[in-house]
Amino acid sequence: MRGRVGALLGAVAVVAGSALTAPSAGFAAAAGVSGGGGGITGQAPCPEAPAFLCGTLTVPFDHSGATPGTLGLRVAFTGNSTAPRGDLLFLTGGPGQPGVPTIERMAGKLEPVLKDYRLVMFDQRGTGGGALQCPGLQEDMGSSDLALPREQSIADCAAALGPDARHYSTADTVADIDLLRRALGARRLTLDGVSYGSFVAERYALAHPARVARLVLDSVVPRQGFDSLDLAALPATARVLRAACRATGCTTDPAADLAATVRRYGNGARILSALTGYEFVDPDYGAVPEILHEAAAGRPEKLLEFFEFVHQQVDTAPAEELSQGLHSAALCADSRFPWGTTDTPVAGRAEALERTRRRLTAEQTWPFDAATATGLGSMLVCLHWPRQQVPPAPPEHQRLPDVPVLLLGGDRDLATPYELMYEQAELAHNPQIVIVPGAAHSVQNRAENPAGRQAVHDFLLR
C-alpha cells in the first residue's frame, strides 16, 4: 500500500492541475470584458481570471425581511451580454463550494457553447470569501459528506452559527438566484448544476418555472433532496466495484469482500466515506479490491492506510474551498431524516434513528449493514443539530417545468449513483438521459471520457 500511495498522490496532482484549464484565445476574444449585469456592482476584470468580469450582488440576509442586513455575493461572468441564447448559470456542488474561483475551468469545459451563451457563476451565500467557519468540523470532514465528525465539533459549529444558520438553506440560495437573474437583466436562465448544484437548479425551476429555459443536471441529487440514509449508494457500491473490477482485470469479488469486512469490523460508514472520496482519484478503484480482500481475511493494515490517505489527500479542504459550516446548515435545513426535519425536538431523534436501524433489511443495505446507513457523517451532524425552523419543501409529486432537461451521470459514481438520476427523470417532461461509461462523480468537470461534455454541448446548442 505504501508504494501505491505514491502513485495515488501523483493522480491527485493531475486532477488538481487539470482544474486550471484556461479558455482559448479565441474564446477570450469572444467573451470580451464589457456589457451586461447592470445590477451587479463594482464590475471589473476578475483578479484571478482577467478574461472574465467580477462584481458583487447584494441580497437580503433574510428574504422575509424579519432580520435586517444584507450579504454581498461575488459573481463572475463572461462579457458577452448580448449572447443569442442568453445566460447560462453554472451551479457548483457541496453544499459549500464557491463558484467564482472555478469560472476559468468551467469556461474551458463549456467553450463550444460560449459564443451562444453568457456564462455566469457566483459564490452561494456562506461560501468562498464569505465562507461560514467551523474549524473543528472542517478538520473532521473537509470536503466529505460522509466522514465521521466529533460531537464536540458539531456542537461548536452549531454554537458559532447560532440562529442565523437557518438563513443558509437552499431556499435562500434559490431566492438569491432570482435576484441574480434580475440583476443580469435576464428573462430566463439556462441552469447547469453539478451534484448539489443539480438540486439547486431543480429547486429554482420548481419555484420559478417561467424563469427557466432549460436544465442540465449532472450527477443528480433528486429534487426531494439527499437521502440521509444513502440507500441508493449502499447497494450501488456492489455494482460499481464489480464493474471497476472487470475493467481492471481483478480476480476477486470486491462486493463480497466488502460485506465480509463490514461484518468483521463494523466500519461500513468509514469505508463508504473513503470509497466516495477515492472515486475522484481513480474511477476504476484500482487498489480497492486487494485492500478489501486482505481486510476480509483479517489483515486490515492496508485498509487503515487507505482511510488515512483519503482523509489527508482527498477530503482535506479549507472552508474557502468547501465550507462545512454552510454544508451542515444547508443539509440540516433541507433534508428529511428518520426523525423528521430539523424542526423536530432533539431529544427524540436518537430513538427514531434506532427504530429505523432495526427496520432496515439486508436487501436495502448489502454489501453494507443497517449501522452504516444510520451512522454516516451528515446524518450524525444533523442528529445533533439544534432545533430550528426549516423552509417548506415543494409538493412531493410536483414536476419540473416543461422545458428541455438533460440528466447526466457516470456509471462509477457512488456519491450520486445513476439510480438517483432515473428517480429524478420521472418528474421531468421527456428528459434526455446520458450515462457515461467509466465516469465517476461530476462528469463535466472530471470524466476522462468526453461523451458527457459532448452531450451537454449538443443539448445546449440544440
Image (cartoon, grey):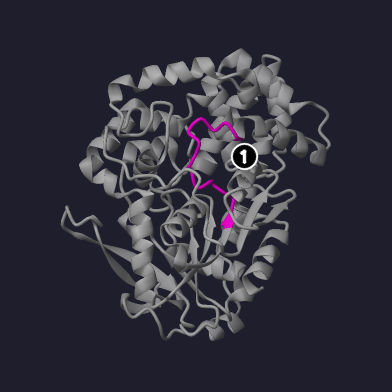
Q: Position of residue 364 (x, y in %)?
A: 62, 25
The quadrant in which the C terminus is found is bottom right
Give the residue drawn at x 44%, y 41%. Answer: 142
Magenta part of the protein: which range? 217-232
Give the residue drawn at x 53%, y 27%. Answer: 270
Q: Position of residue 310 (x, y in %)?
A: 55, 37
Q: Is residue 230 magenta?
A: yes
Amino acid bearing label 1: Leu
Q: Position of residue 360 (x, y in %)?
A: 55, 19
Q: Quadrant of residue 443?
A: bottom right
- Note whether 6 is above or below 34 in the view shown: above
Q: Secondary structure at mark 1?
A: loop
In this view, the residue in front, 181 or 448, is 181
Give the residue drawn at x 33%, y 54%. Answer: 172
The quadrant in which the N terminus is found is top right
Report whether residue 1 is seen.
Answer: no
Q: Which residue is mark 1?
A: 414
Give the residue drawn at x 58%, y 25%. Answer: 304
- Overall secondary structure of the magenta section: loop
